[in-house]
Amino acid sequence: MRSKHAWIKGTFASLSLALAAGSALAADPVTLKLGSWRTEDIAVWQDKVLPVFEAEHPDIKVEFSPINTNEYNAAIQSQIEAGAGPDLLTCRPFDVNREWISRGYFEPLADFGPIKDFDDGAKAAWTDTKGAPFCVPVAAVLAGFYYNIDIFKELGLEVPKTADDFMKVLQKIKDNGKYTPLAYGSAESWQLAYNGLYNIGPSYWKGEQGRLGLINGTKKLTDPDFVQAFAAFAAWKPFLPAGQASLQYADMTQLFTIGRAAILPDGSWNINQVTATGLNVGVFGPPTATADGKRYLQEMPDMAIGINAASKHKDAAKVLLTWLAGPEFQKIYVNAAPGFFSMGKTPVAYENALAQKFADLKTGAELTPRLALDRLSAGNPPLDDEIWRVLQVMFTKDDMTPEKATAELQKGLDSWYKPQK
């Protein structure tokens, strides 16, 4: 039988080891690396987000390590295929992420408790083909139209509610001659899709009815509702600035912020840039196709975060991911990065007035993500990339009609996507 002194001696020995271990952990905390394509979020994470987390979890340090958005996919794939990469990855939505899931890049999250705090719609962009989750949703973005409130007052314009109203407003601005109706150009093809066609198109193809119809094969891009959407978008061409074919995204923003253009079709993610000059800015949602039509709004699942399956610090990564799934982080992030919107079930108040106005557009609207990123761009040619290309041709050459554009896109989809064959 062990003596009382032996037990006490053993207890003190154990306590000494525990204290030593604790001291070592405090002196040398686990350092996690978080990969992202949001280089513009460096200050958000370093100054706003991570200090709060690290104060609550002093044994875990986090290094925010962004890569330029155009290089992110290739860089992450190269790193992970080499057995490296950050401990946590910012996840692209839909097809790109499903490809990464199929390659085994992510730790499965089906048994990760906090994932249950998000509804199926929020998780859908980051699941595998069977619906199993691999990333925790972080933020969604919206698309609509910024407008110069002072120009609208000067010209006696009202915010348009229908497509017909919208065209009349554009014509009145053009007839006045003092301002460019739309700060918009076609040099960067991605935004022709995301801020243009995908912005107004859901009112014609009826949001999820049209998008899911393409996915399950009951709809085709050559159907009248899709052709009408392309035609409605092509109708913007007479209201663009001179030299629009060479106008870059940043140029569009500048044209609007210096007060030379009345309306900027754009996403919520650009709020800080759009308001940087102190312009009196409002926002309105996509006009309805008809006077009695339903309102639709593009809500795009933009960011989620998952754990690298090859990480050596998965336990610490799950601690961080648990915090990122909670309302404390969601409130900090969406207010530090105005124009990004929480995807959690807990309501969030937006401190930025324009962000709140954007969020208010969701009330009464049917929400739908970007048309071609879910399953329709998993083959070759990817429909999303093809839409970028075809729209750029349509806005720079007169011989690409909406009928020709949709026929060309449908032919490409038919070539590989089985539900469309």
Image (cartoon, grey):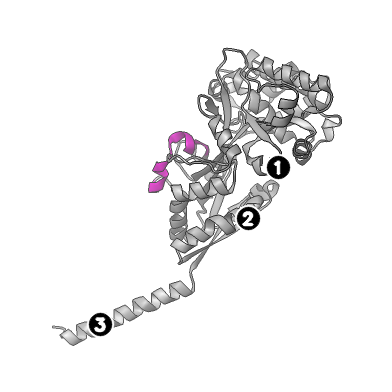
Mark 3 in CB contact with mark 2 (< 8 angstroms): no
Secondary structure type for disc 2? helix
Q: Which residue is mark 3?
A: 10
Label 2 Cα neighbours within 10 Å, binned few <14 / some 14-19 / many ≥20: some
Q: Which residue is mark 2?
A: 42
Which residue is depicted at the point 46% across and 50% down? 328
Q: Start and end of the magenta stretch?
A: 111-125
Q: Nearer the viewer, residue 92 or 249?
A: 249
Say which label, 1 or 2, has the lower sequence index: 2
Q: Nearer the viewer, residue 116 or 407?
A: 116
Quarter of the image containing the N terminus? bottom left
Secondary structure type for disc 1? loop
Using residue 170 as the reference point, say whether residue 142 is left or right of it. left
Please tell me in which quadrant of the rendered image residue 239 appears.
Answer: top right
Tell me the tag on residue 278.
1
- Picture mark count: 3
Q: Position of residue 209 (x, y in %)?
A: 53, 20
Say which label, 1 or 3, has the lower sequence index: 3
Q: CA distance from mark 1 to mark 3?
A: 69 Å
What's under tag 3, amino acid-wise? Gly
Residue 81 seen anywhere in this rendered image of the structure = no
Label 1 or label 3, whichever lies nearer to me, is 1
Q: CA distance from mark 3 to mark 2?
A: 49 Å
What's under tag 1, amino acid-wise? Gly
Tell me the tag on residue 129.
none
Up/down of 119 relative to 11, above or below: above
